[in-house]
Amino acid sequence: MNQVKNRIGKVFLIGAGPGDPGLLTIKGKEYISRADVVVYDFLAAPALLAHASEKAERIYVGKKGGNHTLSQERINALLVEKAQAGLTVARLKGGDPFIFGRGGEEVEVLINAGIPFEVVPGVTSAIAAPAYAGIPLTHRKFTSTLAFITGHEDPTKNGSGIDWASLAKGIGTLVCFMGVKNLTKITTKLMEHGKDPQTPVALVRWGTTSRQKTVTGTLATIVEKAQAAGMKSPAIIVVGEVVTLRESMQWFEKKPLFGKRILVTRSRHQASDLVTRLADLGAECLEYPTIAIEPIAENAALDQAIDHLEDFDWLIFTSVNGVQFFFERLFQKGKDARALGRLHTAVIGPATAQRLRDFGLTSDITPQTFRAESVIQAFAHMDMTNKQVLLPRAKGARPILPIELEKMGARVEEILVYEAQPVTDRTEQLLTRLKDKEVDIITFTSSSTATNFRALLPDETFLELMQGITVASIGPITTDTAKALGFEVHVTASEFTIPGLCQAIVRHCGR
């Protein structure tokens, strides 16, 4: 970490973007990962906190619906306090810190206190929300002028600082922040100053997220339409002829999993592939890992096997984790892939085969289906009599593979190289989301994810918490485990891979 005694720290004001975690800048991600303290707002996507160090202090200072966790003055004081303690502070602000984000005020305080700072611009919602709604803010056929305005001026100001007459007559596209509560006033002012009542208007709420909702109308009708649709903050208001382009240009809301909140229970270091694929399909992913994959400590059996690799004929990997932890220990002992030169290899699943290729080896056997039974079938026509098989895999794995190989005459040395440890650190938050019905789909990618997830749910409220939630499983083994635990499984992938699971969810959603 960056804490040093008797040294002034530094504050990074980082634009967190409008909601889609993928819109965070590379520099913003880097500075979050280096921070000792992360101070974040209501509109900063929670997924961004995953980039922070596990040791970093996380402080929420959000403002929601007029309810301020901390006043702006206390936020300013907090930034100064942490930096004066010699800490590196990442100040995450929704959108861009210098566009109606009070970032300039925070910088002034830092300057007065002698605190070093940097500003990392972010993707502002004024641009991103309309783009995700299919509305280009400028277009040669419509307008080349654009203005950003606030719909929530400083209440202590004497009169309005907004030149409504100029905006109504001189600007082609208007984008208004934080204006939903004052929508009537905004539309009235524009029409009073000469804006055509038939001018198209769009409201985009929760832009760039799976909760995005867009309502369109005109200056004359938008208030009624917004009220009928229940539009509330946070939302962006777009006024101008470019709004008509949404009819042909909308794209985000057409994604197959748009609007779905999907809970990912996979271990944190393995979740990225599933999260990326689901997000690309339009879903909002809620990461609540129920397991952590840990290597078996002081693994004398693995060390001995690596020291005597020449005794084995076959090396079988049943998972990506088995490959990873085996090679980590191989390298730690000063060996590399050349030590496996004379061994034949077999794997379960394309992901495991790819991970083996990452280490320079191509599997001799990669069955078409992705379970232990398929490996057994692949060996059925081989003479396995007295063949020495090394099987590094997970603690608690199904026993069928070594049992069937031994029936064929093989001598199997099964070595446990990793185990799935339960994760419970965010249970209270998880239960709140389930209780508030903020989850549409739960994914299980292994029996251990299902088992540990079930252990987090109180028996007396289990059925109530799971009511209305779709359960999606990566394959029949996981499905059987989940059903035995009391889950109703609605989706079972026919191809037992992450892409297969995603395809099955899309099919189930009928999109």
Image (spheres, rainbow, N blue to C red):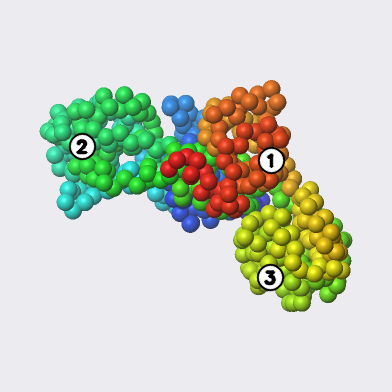
Please state which amino acid type lies under the numbered disc 3: Asp
Q: Which mark is residue 200?
A: 2
Q: Nearer the viewer, residue 272 or 119?
A: 272
Residue drawn 70% across the image and 47% down it: 292
Q: Is residue 496 left or right of residue 223?
A: right
Place residue 468 in its image quadrant. Answer: top right
Q: Is residue 216 above or below residue 395?
A: above
Q: Nearer the viewer, mark 2 or mark 1?
A: 1
- For the residues bearing labels 3 and 1, Cβ distance under 8 angstroms: no
Dot 2 or dot 1: first in sequence order is: 2
Q: Nearer the viewer, residue 375 or 341?
A: 375
Mark 3 or 2 closer to N-term? Answer: 2
Q: Is residue 77 visible?
A: no
Find out whether the residues at labels 3 and 2 contact each other: C-beta distance under 8 Å.
Answer: no
* Quarter of the image that includes the C terminus: top left
> Which residue is identified by label 3?
364
Name the amino acid, label 1: Asp
Callout 3 secondary element: loop
For image coordinates 80% across by 69% down, the residue present is: 383
Q: Residue at x 45, y 54 (%)?
A: 25
- Residue type highlighted by circle 2: Pro
Q: Residue 467, position in %: x, y?
A: 57, 27
Disc 1 target residue: 480
